[in-house]
Image: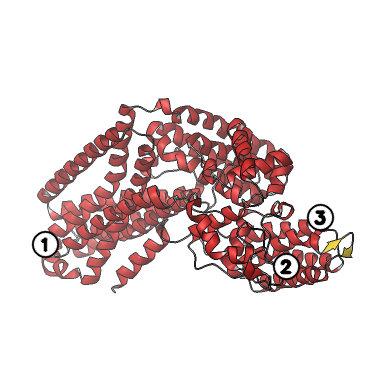
Amino acid sequence: MPNVLRCLAAFLLLSLPFAVPAYAADPDAQTAWRLLDYIAVDYPAAVQDGEVVSEGEYAEMGEFSEAVRARLDALPPTDDLPQLVSDAERLQLAIAVKSAPTEVAGLARNLARELLAAYPMPLAPVSTPDLGRAGDLYQQHCASCHGVTGAGDGPAGVALDPAPIDFTDESRARERSVFALYQVIEQGLEGTGMASYAHLSAEDRWALSFYIGQYAYPADLAQRGEQLWKADGALHREVPDLGTLTQLTPAALAARIGEDNARAVTAYLRRQPQAVEPEPAGSLALARSRLAESTRAYEAGDQHAARDLALSAYLDGFEPVEPLLAARDRALMTRIEGAMAELRSRIGRSASTEDVRAQVEVVDGLFSEAEVALAPDSSSGISTFLGALTILLREGLEALLILIAIVAFLRKAERPDVMPYVHAGWVGALLAGGLTWFAATYMVSISGASRELTEGFAALFAAAVLLFVGIWMHGKSQAGAWQRYIKDKLSHALSKRSAWFLFLLSFVVVYREVFETVLFYAALWSQGNGGAILAGGGLGAIALAAMAWAMLRYSRRLPIAQFFSISSILIAVLTVVLAGKGIAALQEAGWLSVSVVGVPRIALLGIYPTLQGVLTQLLTLAVLIAGFSYNRRAARVVDPRR
């Protein structure tokens, strides 16, 4: 395989949000988390009032706490690891001295939370679990040990020590989250008869987790839970999304809304998890909830948690509705992006609590405006048509300019044999865009972080390539013997490797824009007016084709020196633009810090009011100016009359 194909494969694996998860969970961290959850839930069965009530259970608690400590030693070192080890030793000591169950459970839960923060693992399914076949999966894989009704009385479990878990035991089930059930199903549990079911798909494991989590909460409770859920909007703020639902224990929910209500809501949501899927306004409600949590964390002195929650407000709450809002009111979308960046900047520079709270109020007010703009009655055929048209023109023009420069250059160089590589690149990008549409619609939910990382890395890759291409083209426009160079050298300068590199460049620059366009169109399509979307997109495609034809025809008439000169300037501008956009996307994904500065926001030019973005663009511009200056000096050496 040529090197460039390896690069393309790596780029796809890193950037396509449906190819791989954003991170791979460390198996030692997963095992340690499961053991901690088991300790928190089962320790009361081992110790009561400082006395051991079950020697077997108590020995198991000691064994599990030692296993947690050993798993921590095997984890990759991080700044958080020493504190995790210290907390694990505190837990071991608490078990050794037979501390109260509430104390041990608190230590175990706290350590589990810290472990998740330091070594992230998938916390929720990528899409709503399909519980339709979960019953059959349970009978096939679980009933022999846990019993047909989940009571832990299956025939194969009689000889097991410890005995299989009784899923109908509510006193135990109220301390266990769906996420905890998923972890045990995926990894198994050391020291018990519970084997790993990692061979099942993630979708099946999540479906089983929700199904098993129903046994302690009868169906008649679910009817009351549905009534409560539909009547009380405050409940939606308590369980705003799948991630919260999978991690929330019934006991924790009971502490917020009362025991009876928590039992009913748990019974309902574990049978109908799709009920927590947010509509556009619900997504903004999630963003508001995250901002409120961020404010509380900041006031409590936890700056790290405040930053993460503010980032989640953007990526998980605002980002899903950003495409639709951009189509209806792009100026408002821009103001919200700027306000949320300013909030993250204030948190990052340790601003006063009053300043952070004031900025949260600004963002909340903008969210109110967004809810009005996103209301169903705000959509019309004309607005949808214009949105589809302008999105395609805006996203397509940037890629078109780069492609036209490449195609025109190859024509000037009389290298038609390389042209198929370029065409294969942009056609492949369109096909990948179609797969993205299918995946985003039917397979997975593309997260805000995945979207921003894809755009950011693609933009920076294209900027790095175009930086050198622009300087090279400018050099050819300055050389006095350019005609001889073109005839004698350029026609042989494009090797097979160069041709594959042009394929990669054309793929990346087009896929970046297609990826953005697909997400915008998917958001528009979900709101109806399909005919208006197709009409707007069709007109936009025709307009782009007409512009491509006109630019190619004009470029044919240009003398080669003038062509190189104009192309080098165009590519230099696009390089600076892409550098700014790449940095902005990585900042929005939380990969780079945000330091707001007082410069105007001009998204068309990739200018965003952050110190990191502005400095990157200035550095890129400085390299271009230095390269162009060197070309002019070199040209004077060749031809002193210049």
Q: Nearer the viewer, residue 538 or 608?
A: 538
Determine the residue positioned at 38% across, 45% down: 519
Tag 1's secondary structure?
A: loop
Question: Hey, what amino acid is under mark 1?
Answer: Glu
Determine the residue positioned at 36% across, 37% down: 524
Tag 2's secondary structure?
A: helix
Tag 3's secondary structure?
A: helix
- Estimate the x, y position of residue 358 in percent, counting from the top left: 63, 33
- Estimate the x, y position of residue 194 in percent, counting from the top left: 63, 69
Question: Hey, what amino acid is under mark 2?
Answer: Val
- Determine the CA span between mark 1 and mark 2: 66 Å
Of circles 1 and 2, the one toward us is: 2
Q: Are marks 3 and 1 in contact (CB under 8 Å)?
A: no
Q: Which mark is residue 414?
A: 1
Q: How is the image coloured?
A: secondary structure
| Residue neighbourhood size for the residue with mark 2, other residues' Cα within 10 Å, grouped as few (<14), some (14–19), many (≥20) | some
Q: Nearer the viewer, residue 418 or 137?
A: 137
Tag 1 or tag 3, which sits nearer the N-term?
Answer: 3
Depicted 179 relative to depicted 312: above or below: below
Q: Which mark is residue 85?
A: 2
Determine the residue positioned at 25% across, 53% down: 568
Look at the image and tell me whether residue 576 can be seen: no
Tag 2 or tag 1, which sits nearer the N-term?
Answer: 2
Using the rendered view, name the quadrant where residue 602 is placed.
Answer: top left
Look at the image and tell me whether residue 549 can be seen: yes
Depicted 577 relative to depicted 337: above or below: below
- Estimate the x, y position of residue 618 in percent, counting from the top left: 42, 50
Task: Name the residue beneath numbered marker 3.
Answer: 102
Depicted 465 relative to depicted 402: above or below: below
Q: Nearer the viewer, residue 124 or 148?
A: 148
In the orientation shown, which residue stands out farthest toward the right?
Answer: 50
